[in-house]
Amino acid sequence: MKGPLFYSKILLFGEYGIIRDSKGLSIPYNFYNGALKRDEDPSAEAIASNASLKRFAAYLETLQSEQSDLVTFDIEALKNDVETGMYFDSSIPQGYGVGSSGALVAAIYDKYAQDKITVLENLTREKLLQLKNIFSQMESFFHGKSSGLDPLNSYLSIPILINSKDNIEATGIPNQILDGKGAVFLLDSGIVGETAPMVTIFMENLKDKGFRSMLKNQFVKYTDACVENFLGGDMKSLFMNTKKLSKVVLNNFKPMIPEQFHAIWQKGIDTNDYYLKLCGSGGGGYILGFTEDLERAKASLKDYKLEVVYQF
Ligand SMILES: Nc1ncnc2c1ncn2[C@@H]1O[C@H](COP(=O)(O)OP(=O)(O)OP(=O)(O)O)[C@@H](O)[C@H]1O
Ligand SMILES: C[C@@](O)(CCO)CC(=O)[O-]
């Protein structure tokens, strides 16, 4: 048995800001994917994944008994499949900010939810919000509070624009130009990050008036501008605002940037070869880069492997 594929995602803009009602833009990233599967002769990885699914199934059983209005599952089928070795066969790295738990949640909802909202129907804003809410409750099993955006992205496999917490919509992004000079890329920090402790640091920082004012007057402002520039295809302004965002993050989100990347972060700002930003909650995993000239960025970051996500 092997189920349909669910993809990783990249939050291009909006990390942390979306907690405070900034805009956000999240796109599917098809390079990594996962599917529910069963093997005759499971690997150690499959056995570990199966154990994780077993705990998740127990959580979903409690969730539906407490909130039957929200969502119900064919729990017997799920439990039976887990008992007989089902696991999530996935190439999506865990703790890297590309939504490994989101893809898993999407796969489980797709296979076991009753009266599910499907990709084929007319997805009104209400339906999208309802799905996001269901996914948020399901995914919170993996990392405490979740916005539900990752599973939503993986489930629908289309870009999602977050206008504010309760206003999200499916969107289109400008077509890629496959041999374009400009690019968005991933930089592997080589460190596994965890979302929950990073969000805790952010929430602590929010108690500070200066931090809140920086957030509103700079971080959210540049984030919103980047989203608008990207969707509008205004690449010149996009780079200007990404540079500003990169600076603000380096100065105010230091705990979210692994120490050994502070210098190259600054180098990008100084040389204009590339601009780095957080990819999700940070603290490890991937760092997201924007460059007007991919070859120049590659030369400048020659000790690192860049994974190109989008070219224009
Ligand atoms: N293939 C898998 N099989 C079973 N469980 C998995 C699998 N992939 C991910 N998970 C679960 O998801 C957890 C990782 O989710 P977490 O939200 O911490 O990181 P992430 O989704 O990779 O990153 P982010 O939320 O920052 O994008 C793992 O600890 C595991 O419980
Ligand atoms: C850091 C955060 O804003 C994005 C993590 O992908 C947390 C969230 O909104 O769920």
Image: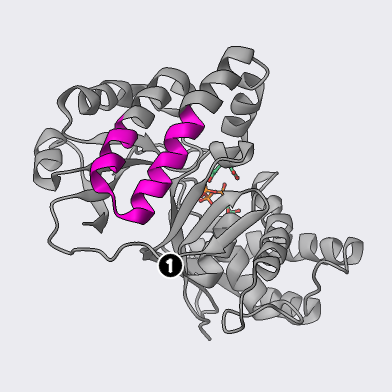
The residue located at (38%, 31%) in the rendering is 245
Q: Residue furthest right?
A: 66
Front-most of 173 and 192?
Answer: 173
Magenta-span inclusion, residue 235: yes
Q: Main secondary structure of the magenta part?
A: helix
Q: Classify residue 93 as left or right of residue 185.
A: right
The residue located at (60%, 25%) in the rendering is 201
Q: Classify residue 82 as left or right of residue 220.
A: right
In this orientation, does residue 192 appear?
no
Q: Classify residue 293 as left or right of residue 79.
A: left
Magenta-colored span: 219-243
Q: Position of residue 114 (x, y in %)?
A: 76, 80
Q: Classify residue 176 as left or right of residue 71.
A: left
Reading the image, the residue beneath label 1 is 33
The residue located at (31%, 62%) in the rendering is 174
Q: Position of residue 154 (x, y in %)?
A: 51, 66
